[in-house]
Amino acid sequence: MEKINWSKYFPAAITVTNENGTVVEMNDFSVESYRKDGGANLIGDNVIECHKEPSLSKVKKLYEEHALNVYTITKNGKKKLIYQAPYFVEGRFSGMVEISLPLPDEMPHYDRDKK
């Protein structure tokens, strides 16, 4: 069976860093999303150092505590879900994955716990 690089085609920006905050991977949507900041040239740069306060303190804390950070934003008139999560290799903190997922203006919410 042929292995497909699905993240290349997934319609959300996926950015991966190592444990020190260095960008190690960006899918095509991420490169496009960060084009004004350097696009693919951001690979090898440190995401912690590129933030200004108050974001800088928050990003540092995410790396120190290996914490999850999830929120929504509106940017350029589009609503997005930002999902920043740590990943672990063999139990060792190895970095963060950020997924910036465009959301439709209107979207249903289903409560699966509701009887």
Image (cartoon, rainbow, N blue to C red):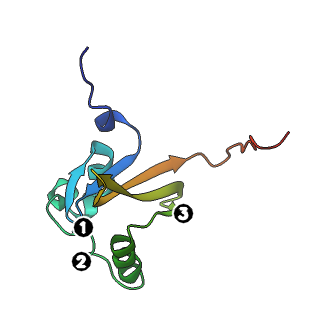
Instruction: Check the image and report above or below for 84 versus 101.
Output: below
Mark 1 vs mark 3, CA separation in Å: 20 Å
Q: Residue under circle 2?
A: 49
In the picture provided, is 7 more to the left or to the right than 75? Answer: left
Q: Which residue is drawn at 50% across and 48% down?
A: 102
Q: Which corner quadrant of the image does residue 52 belong to?
A: bottom left
* Residue 12 coordinates in the image, percent (x, y): 41, 45
Q: Nearer the viewer, residue 40 or 109?
A: 109
In the picture provided, is 7 more to the left or to the right than 114? Answer: left
Q: Which corner quadrant of the image does residue 54 belong to?
A: bottom left
Instruction: Check the image and report above or below for 87 versus 20.
Output: above
- Kindly indicate whether the residue at mark 2 contacts the one at mark 1 (C-beta within 8 angstroms): yes
Q: Residue at x 34, y 54 (%)?
A: 87
> Which callout, 2 or 3, points at the residue further toward the start of the chain?
2
Q: Which residue is drawn at 32% across and 32% down?
A: 6
- Kindly indicate whether the residue at mark 3 contacts the one at mark 1 (C-beta within 8 angstroms): no
